[in-house]
Amino acid sequence: MAMRTLEDLLKPIDATVFFRDYYERRFLHSEGSPGKYECLMPWNALNDILRHHHLPSPRLRVFKNGSPIAQALYRDMCSNHPSIMPEALQRQLDDGATLIIDSVDRIYEPIAAVVEDLEFRLRSAVQVNLYAAWRSERGFDLHWDKHDVIVLQVAGRKTWTVYSHSREWPLRDDIVKNDPPPETPIWEGTLSAGQMLYIPRGWWHAAVPTNEPTLHLTVGIHQRHGVEFLQWYVHRLRTEVAVRQNLPVLASQEAKAEYVAELRNTLIQHCDENILADYIEECARTKRARPRFSFPHGGPDPMEALRDPTSCTLTWNAAYPPVVRQGAQTGTSEIRFNDKTWIFADVCRPVLNLLQEKRVCSLMELLRLAPGELTPSVVAALTKQLLERGLVKIGTNDAANGHHA
């Protein structure tokens, strides 16, 4: 069964429960079902990736007991693009090493499809890394990550130990060193194929193979934090003279105090109740969707697709939900998207709102929104406009999975 949404990953945990009780709050272990995640990365898909893709270091690396294995032990270092030597890599893994491939969501379509939905729903960058081993030595030592992690056990088993955080919201480049982990773990157990873990940022964890082939995916959710927001805010204040002027290094203490007061007033003056919403909107407006191609014809013809509206889908061509709001002119709505503003008649608003909410919907769903006004011809015309402006992609419900570069 294809897995394409956040809900698919979380089942049997309800998405509403996940966001209410766990997301950014506390650890979760979900039993899932045997083989649930196998469709995301079967062993033969991993073999194909190793065979057909150039994966330089550090994107592909090999670790054992917390230390990296020298590339010369599994790569042909004599060429300009050191390639993987299958027998040499097999020996390293037979000897207890763990194979790690970063960003497999960029090279394998089943994972990419899920990640697109995660990024849209979470409004955060997502990266998926792969870990494969078949002995009993650990890959990494006990550590914490600078982002939230969803662990999907694809094949085999792995023993995990998870501790709570020792510093709230730690940063990788923090000015204060993180404290050691708590003495008592909050969870110890074996993760079997089809099970899932959710580990919030800063929570300590370690994983050890169980002397059998094991493969898991780590879904890293890279949320934005206050430091990034403040950096954006300060950059935005470069329009202000008080921010651009030289520091009064040689001035009197009184003059320095006056400068600090002026700077403080400037910071406060522009930090109104809408400033965070402005930042989030700008992130959504400027974040580009992951590229997709439909050579040689550029995808299905909208009019042809409308002949079977139950199988034809429209997908926002946006990484995060675009902003849809009332237009400046009466009877219009506007979309702020890819750092541009697009104007549509209000009759299109139900379509825009549904796409903003769901990201992907069938043309049949759009036709049901307002049968009186959204006739097939109106939906076809709107679809053509959305496609021409690069706002949506058109596809089918039964699109086949495969590789993409």
Image (cartoon, helix red, strand yellow):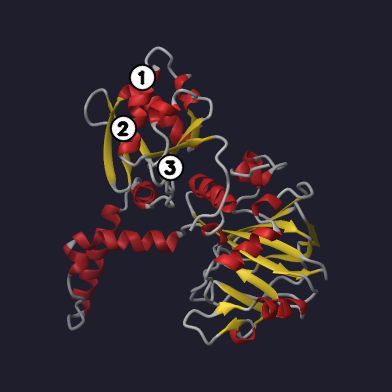
Work out whether 375 lies above or below 38. above
Q: What amino acid type is highlighted by mark number 2?
A: Gln
The CA span between labels 2 and 3 is 19 Å
Q: Quick one: label 1 or label 3, which is nearer the N terminus?
A: 3
> Which SS class for mark 2?
helix
The CA span between labels 1 and 3 is 26 Å
Work out whether 73 lies above or below 286. below
Work out whether 307 lies above or below 136. above
Whether residue 204 can be seen here: no
> Which SS class for mark 3?
loop
Q: Which mark is residue 321?
A: 3
Which dot, 2 or 3, sits closer to the camera? 2
58 with respect to 188 (left or right): left
Q: What amino acid type is highlighted by mark number 3?
A: Pro
Which dot, 1 or 3, sits closer to the camera? 1
28 with respect to 75 (left or right): right
Rate crowding at label 3 as few (under 14), some (14 to 19) or many (20 or more) other CA atoms within 10 Å.
many
Q: Name the residue under label 2.
A: 385
Q: What amino acid type is highlighted by mark number 1?
A: Ser
Q: Mark 1 points at which residue?
A: 377
179 with respect to 272 (left or right): right
Rate crowding at label 2 as few (under 14), some (14 to 19) or many (20 or more) other CA atoms within 10 Å.
some
Q: Which mark is residue 249?
A: none
Q: Quick one: label 2 or label 3, which is nearer the N terminus?
A: 3
Q: Where is residue 110 in the image (x, y as percent from the top left)?
A: 59, 50
Q: Residue at x 65, y 52 (%)?
A: 40
Work out whether 405 lies above or below 314. below
Name the foreground residue: 212 vs 270. 212
378 with respect to 216 (left or right): left
